[in-house]
Image (spheres, rainbow, N blue to C red):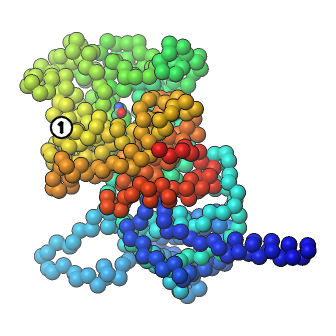
C-alpha cells in the first residue's frame, strides 16, 4: 500500500513539474501572438543564452533574463557566446530591415519612430527561443515578456523585500511554439511619484522603477519639491535641502487641526539622484525631475524668506493643500535662485524633458505685492480679457525657464495651468484638470502628456467602499476606469492633432501615503491597467480579457513580496 501511495505521489509530483507551461497572455498584451500550442520547446537547467558579448547593453539584458528565469523557476541558464549550444538566442537587427532598400541619393533615410526602435520579436520553435530586436531596448522588452510568461509555482512570499523570494524549482518549462511581434503604441509611457509630501528611500524608488519596467513604462516623473518639503540637494545652496526638507510636525488626517508632534524630513543627495538615474537607465526608464515653480515653494521659502512677497517667516508647511505663499515674481533674486536650482537639476538629470510644475500658483500675494506689480508694469502686461496680468506674469517666468532649458538642450513640461497666461513657444503640457488643457494645447500644435484626474490620479480610492482601506485623498478611480481611458480623444482631435499626444501617465500624490506598502497598494494593479492604455492598440483592449490575465500578474507581485490591492473594480 505504502509503495502504491508513493508511486502515485511521485507520478503527481512529476506531472506537476512537467506540466509547467509558459503562458504568453501577459500584461501588457503584445501586439501579435501567433501560438501553436500543440508543440513545445522545453527549457531546462544548464541550457544557454547566446548573445553578442561585445555589446555591454546586450550582455546586461542577457544577464537580466538569466536572473529572472532563475528567480521564478529555479532553472539556471548559462550565458554563452556559443550560438550552437544555446536554447535562447538574443540578436540585434531584423532581417526585414536588412533587406529594405537603402534610400536613393538625396532622399532622406526613413526615420523610425521611438516605438519602432523598441520593437522585438520572439520565435519559439524546435530549435529554441529566438529573440530579435532593432536595439538593445527591444531585447529588454522581450526579456520582460518572457519573464511574465514564465509559470509561477511554489510558495507565496510575504514582506516587502526588493528581491524575489526563492521559487519552487522547476525542472523545465514548456514554451509553446509561438511568433510574437510587439512594439508599444505610445512613445511616452509615464508614471509619477510624489516624494515631497512624503520621502521614500532609494530602495523603494528602485522597486517602483522595477515595476514600471515590468509594465513597459519608459518615463518616471519624479516630484520632489513642495510646500511640505524640499528634497533635492543643490550644491550652491547647501542650506536649501538641509533645512527645507524638514517640517517640525505633520497634521493628522485631512487637516484635522491635530498634529503628530514628530519632525519629518529626508532629501536626495545629487549622488543618490545619479544612482537612480543610472538604475532607471539600465531599465530603459528616463527620470523627469520636477521643480514645482513658482507655487508649491514653501519648503524653499522657509530657507530663503526674502524670495517670498511678504518676507515670511514661512515654516515648512505642516498641513495639506496649496500655500498662498509663492515665489515673488518681482524680486530679481527669484530668477537667480531658479536658474541656480534648475541648472544643477540639468547637471544631474540627463532627461530631455524637465518639468517646471506651474500648477496651483495662487496669485493673492502677487496682486498686492509692489515688486510683482512693478515687474508687470516693466513687462508692459495688460489684462486682455483672456489672460490676467498675474497669469501673464507666470507665463513670463515660464518663458524664462523655457529659454534657460533650451540653452541646455532640454524641453520644458508644465502642468496645464501654463496655458492660462498664454503658452510659451515650445512648452509641453501635462493635462491634469481633465482633458481640455490637452485638447487646447494639441490644437495649438503643442505636445501633450495626458494625465487627467478622472482616469490617471491613482491617489484616489480604487474601491467604492472606503471602509477598510487606508485613508486617502478621496475620489474613486477603479481599475476598470483607468483601463477605459483613450488618450487620443478621437471625438475632439483630428488625426493630425492626435500626433501631438505623446502618451498617458498615472500620478501618485502622497499626502496620505506615508509608507511603502501603501505606495504599492495604490499603484497596483492600476499600473497594469494604464500599461495596456500605454502599450496596446485601442482595438486590442478588452477589460474582461484583461481581468482574466491579471491573476498571474498578482501572483508575480506575491512572489516579489510587493503589496497590492486584492480587489478589482
Ligand atoms: C496637480 O495635481 N496639482 C498637478
Ligand atoms: Zn512679489
Residue at image location 90% in from the left, 76% down from the top:
3
Secondary structure of residue under mark 1: loop
Q: Depth check: 335 or 384 in front?
A: 384
Image coords of residue 121 (percent x, y): 41, 74
Q: Is residue 171 left or right of residue 371?
A: right
Q: Depth check: 120 or 135 in front?
A: 120
Image coords of residue 98 (percent x, y): 31, 82
Res 139 quadrant in image: bottom left
Q: Depth check: 13 or 274 in front?
A: 13
The vertical placement of 169 against 204, above or below, is: below
Q: In this view, does 508 lie to the left or right of 363?
A: right
Res 285 quadrant in image: bottom left
**Residue 355 at least partly seen:** no
Residue at image location 41% in from the left, 32% down from the top:
475
Image coords of residue 401 (percent x, y): 25, 36
**Residue 537 at least partly seen:** yes
Residue at image location 60% in from the left, 55% down from the top:
555
Q: In this view, does 170 lie to the left or right of 462?
A: right
Please state the quadrant of the image where ligand 1 appears.
Answer: top left
Q: In this view, does 316 lie to the left or right of 382?
A: right
The vertical placement of 449 against 218, above or below, is: above
The vertical placement of 480 against 92, above or below, is: above
Residue furthest to the front = 1
| Pointer 1 residue | 423
Residue at image location 25% in from the left, 51% down from the top:
488
Q: Quadrant of the N terminus?
A: bottom right
Image coords of residue 163 (percent x, y): 63, 54
> Counting other residues with Cα less than 10 Å from the Cα at mark 1, is it few (<14), some (14-19), or many (20 or more)?
many
Amino acid at each position: 500500500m505504502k509503495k502504491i501511495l508513493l508511486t502515485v505521489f511521485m507520478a503527481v509530483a512529476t506531472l506537476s513539474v512537467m506540466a509547467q507551461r509558459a503562458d504568453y497572455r501577459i500584461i501588457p498584451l503584445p501586439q501579435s501572438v501567433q501560438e501553436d500550442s500543440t508543440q513545445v520547446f522545453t527549457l531546462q537547467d544548464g541550457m544557454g543564452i547566446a548573445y553578442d558579448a561585445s555589446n555591454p547593453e546586450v550582455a546586461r539584458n542577457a544577464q537580466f533574463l538569466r536572473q529572472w528565469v532563475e528567480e521564478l523557476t529555479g532553472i539556471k541558464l548559462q550565458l554563452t557566446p556559443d550560438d550552437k549550444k544555446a536554447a535562447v538566442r538574443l540578436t540585434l537587427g531584423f532581417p526585414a530591415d536588412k533587406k529594405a532598400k537603402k534610400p536613393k541619393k538625396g532622399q532622406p533615410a526613413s526615420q523610425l519612430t521611438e516605438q519602432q526602435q523598441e520593437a522585438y520579436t520572439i520565435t519559439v520553435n524546435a530549435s529554441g527561443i529566438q529573440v530579435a530586436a532593432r536595439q538593445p531596448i527591444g531585447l529588454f522588452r522581450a526579456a520582460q515578456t518572457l519573464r511574465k510568461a514564465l509559470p509561477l509555482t511554489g510558495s507565496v512570499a510575504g514582506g516587502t523585500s526588493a528581491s524575489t523570494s526563492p521559487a519552487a524549482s522547476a525542472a523545465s518549462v514548456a514554451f509553446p511554439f509561438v511568433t510574437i511581434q510587439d512594439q508599444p503604441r505610445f512613445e511616452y509611457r509615464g508614471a509619477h511619484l510624489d516624494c515631497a509630501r512624503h520621502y521614500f528611500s532609494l530602495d523603494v524608488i528602485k522597486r517602483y522603477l522595477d515595476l514600471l519596467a515590468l509594465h513597459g513604462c519608459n518615463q518616471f516623473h519624479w516630484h520632489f519639491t513642495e510646500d511640505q518639503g524640499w528634497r533635492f540637494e543643490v550644491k550652491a545652496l547647501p542650506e536649501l535641502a538641509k533645512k527645507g526638507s524638514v517640517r517640525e510636525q505633520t497634521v493628522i488626517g485631512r487637516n484635522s487641526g491635530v498634529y503628530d508632534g514628530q519632525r519629518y524630513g529626508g532629501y536626495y543627495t545629487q549622488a543618490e539622484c545619479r544612482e537612480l538615474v543610472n538604475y532607471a537607465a539600465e531599465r530603459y526608464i528616463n527620470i523627469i525631475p520636477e521643480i514645482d515653480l513658482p507655487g508649491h515653494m514653501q519648503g524653499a521659502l522657509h530657507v530663503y524668506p526674502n524670495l517670498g512677497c511678504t518676507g515670511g517667516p514661512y515654516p515648512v508647511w505642516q498641513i495639506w493643500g496649496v500655500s498662498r505663499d509663492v515665489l515673488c515674481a518681482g524680486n530679481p533674486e527669484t530668477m537667480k535662485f531658479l536658474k541656480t536650482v534648475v541648472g544643477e537639476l540639468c547637471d544631474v538629470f540627463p532627461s530631455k524633458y524637465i518639468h517646471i510644475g506651474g500648477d496651483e500658483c495662487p496669485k493673492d500675494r502677487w496682486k498686492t505685492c509692489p515688486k510683482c506689480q512693478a515687474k508687470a508694469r516693466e513687462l508692459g502686461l495688460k489684462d486682455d480679457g483672456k489672460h490676467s496680468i498675474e497669469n501673464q506674469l507666470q507665463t513670463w517666468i515660464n518663458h524664462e525657464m523655457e529659454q534657460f532649458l533650451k540653452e541646455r538642450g532640454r524641453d520644458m513640461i508644465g502642468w496645464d495651468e501654463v496655458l492660462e497666461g498664454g503658452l510659451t513657444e515650445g512648452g509641453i503640457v501635462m493635462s491634469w484638470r481633465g482633458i481640455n488643457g490637452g485638447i487646447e494645447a494639441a490644437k495649438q500644435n503643442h505636445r501633450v502628456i495626458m494625465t487627467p484626474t478622472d482616469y490617471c490620479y491613482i491617489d484616489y480610492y480604487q474601491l467604492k467602499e472606503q471602509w477598510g482601506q487606508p485613508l486617502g485623498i478621496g475620489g474613486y478611480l477603479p481599475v476598470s476606469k483607468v483601463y477605459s481611458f483613450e488618450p487620443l480623444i478621437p471625438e475632439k482631435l483630428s488625426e493630425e492633432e492626435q500626433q501631438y499626444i505623446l502618451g498617458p501617465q498615472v500620478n501618485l500624490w502622497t499626502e496620505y501615503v506615508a509608507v511603502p506598502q501603501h505606495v504599492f497598494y495604490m499603484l497596483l494593479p492600476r499600473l497594469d491597467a494604464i500599461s495596456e492604455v500605454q502599450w496596446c492598440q485601442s482595438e486590442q483592449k478588452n477589460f474582461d480579457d484583461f481581468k482574466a490575465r491579471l491573476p498571474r500578474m498578482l501572483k508575480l507581485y506575491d512572489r516579489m513580496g510587493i503589496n497590492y490591492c486584492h480587489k478589482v473594480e
